[in-house]
Every structure is written in C-alpha cells, then in structure tokens.
Amino acid sequence: MKILALQLKRIGDLVLTTPALAALKTWQADCHIALGVHSSTAGLLPVVPHFDTAIVFGPGRGWAPWQQVLTGHFDVVLDFTGTDRSAFATRLSRAAPRATFEWVRGKGLRRLAYTEFVDSSVRDRHTADHNLDLARALTLADPIAVDPQLTPPQTPPLGGSGKYIVIHPFTARPEKNWSPKSWADVATSCSNRGFDCVLTGGDSAGEKEHHERILNEAAGARIRSVAGTTDLVQLCGLIAEAELVISCDTAAVHLAAAYTRPQIALFGPTNPFHWRPRHLRSIVISAAQPGEPMTEFNPRMKGGTMDRISTATVCRAIDTLLTK
C-alpha cells in the first residue's frame, strides 16, 4: 500500500505527526509512506522516522512536487494540514480514500478534495493525539506509540566535551518571549551549578539581538550563543545530548520531547494543553499558573503575559530535573 501523508505546517506540527507515522508502520510494516512537507521543515527530514520517500513543497520547488503527487499512484492520502495547497495535492493524487479532519468540511470548495472526514476536535485534543486520530481512521486500531519520535542525528556533537544545558530563548511571536534579563538570570544560575549554557536559535536580526542582550546581562557566566550557525539536524544533535533543555513555546519544545531530554517549557499567552511535552522528564510552567509547574491541563485555559513567570520558579524546576 502506498500512503501519501501531508504535513505542510511548521516544525512542531511535523514532529507531532511522527506518532501517526509510527502507527501506520505498526499497522502495516511494508506500507510505503511518502511524506509531504514544506521546504521550511525539510531540513528536519534526516531525523524523522517512519517514512520512505519525501515530497517537498514550497518556494522554488516548481512543478516537481506536484508531479510526484500526480504520478505517485497512491492508494490513500492522509492530509494532516487542511490548507488549500494540501487540498489541491490531495485531489491531484486521485487516491481513494482521501481523508482529512472534520473541521475542513466547512472550508468551502476545499472540502471537495476529500472522500472522508475524521471527527477529531483540534480544540479538545493534544496535537499529537489529534494527528493520531487521522491515522486511526485507516488502521482502525489504537496505536502503540503516542509520543513524538526523532532518530539520533549522525553528526558530530557540537556541545563540547563537558555537560551543558541548552537554552532556546526566542520565538518570532514577541508575546511568547521572556525578557533577556530573566534568561540571563537562569543562565547564570545554571553556570553556578557547573554547567555550560548554549543559546540556540536562528539567524534573524531580532533573534541575534535577543541573544546579545542575554549575553550582556549574563556577563561572567559560562554561556555562548550558536544562533544562526546550526541547521535543524545540528540543533537536534545539541538537544539530544543536553543535560537539560529550557525553552519558550517554540519548536525546541518538540525537539526536546522527541529525544525525551529533561526539559522546562515556558508558556505565556498560548495554552500548553495542545502543545506541551508529556514525557516524565518534562516540566511545564505557564503564565496562567506562574508560581509552580503545571500538573493539570485544560483545553480552554487562558494564558498570561510572560513577565508573570519568575526566575525563581524556573530555577526550582531546574533543581528538580537535575537531581532526578
């Protein structure tokens, strides 16, 4: 059986689709899965398991991905994305069945691309579970794997020979960012515990400026920035070998979860219910409940501003994870 799985959204969405891919392979080990992704996430493909071939959409790709879909002779399409682009790819495949989520049914002409709609509430389900619901429509069985998975990268470690902590302090949405002073205080605390700190991030001017402010505030601490110097696989390598990963609500949360690294995820205005790490070595701190780590999650919980989270709360969480 040839399956086309379309996940054309962001890095976190791709990582949280890996449990669904695992479920498909568990159901039928010899199925061929062609994974359709956007070019912005294609750099992660070397560490994504449970697929056989890739189709990369996006700027500069031209007709090539559409031709791959048209000539792929797929038996089934599972569209985890639900956008106009993924709907067109779904219809172009001429497969049957062609399945997506129930919420897409209300999206005008887009709904005509599909033969089946799976009832799964994007509001009431963790994103990984939501994606698994679509896989279940084909497998008709409960999956064995429910956690995101990435394979260890085959690249030399960039973290150095000693123990280090990864801090990923920036996201493109300003309201989800913690202050440079707060990050610097946490980095200094980690340094005082005997750990090197590695600031990870992209190469945008705003991100590099954020890093520079953290470095200035944490003068004297054992801290360095690799912003803009690593690709996605190298970032995975850094995270996979870290003693601890501390990040705001961004892709690093999902990468750390996929490698089950001890991690602290900081959530401000967004609800961690849908995106939180769920393994035993993870701690979620939300501005909605800033005094202590969250243990109960509600799909309708309101968030808060990041300045409600104190460095003292984060430092207590660090002590908890490093002493386990």
Image (cartoon, rainbow, N blue to C red):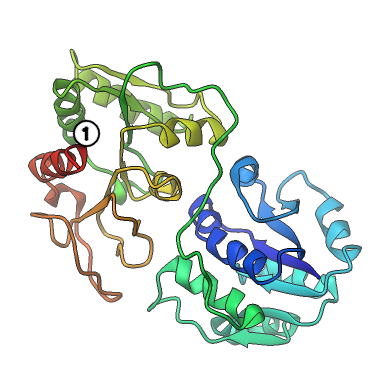
Judged from this view, the residue extending furthest toward the right is 71
For residue 32, which quarter of the picture?
bottom right
Is label 1 in a helix, a strand or a loop?
helix
In the rendered image, residue 34, in percent from the top left (x then y), is placed at 75, 59
Residue appearing at x 54%, y 22% in the figure: 156
Residue 276 falls left or right of residue 54: left
Residue type pointed to by label 1:
Trp
Q: Position of residue 270 (x, y in %)?
A: 31, 61
Q: Position of residue 309 (x, y in %)?
A: 14, 49
**Up-down relation of residue 293 to residue 151 (above or below):** below
**Of the pair 286 and 33, the residue shown nearer to us:** 33
Residue 40 in view (yes/no): no
Figure quadrant of the N terminus: bottom right
- Which is more toward the observer, 3 or 83? 3
- Residue 188, image x and y in percent? 16, 24
Q: Quadrant of the C terminus?
A: top left
Q: Nearer the viewer, residue 186 or 20?
A: 20
- Position of residue 193 in the picture relative to residue 166 (left or right): left
Q: Quadrant of residue 224?
A: top left
Q: Residues within 10 Å of mark 1 (few under 14, many from 20)?
A: many
Residue at image coords 60%, 74%: 135
Q: Which residue is mark 1?
A: 183
Horizontal placement of 123 versus 6: left or right?
left
Instruction: Report the residue at 76% width, 65% height from top.
Output: 31
Tell me: 53 left or right of 268: right
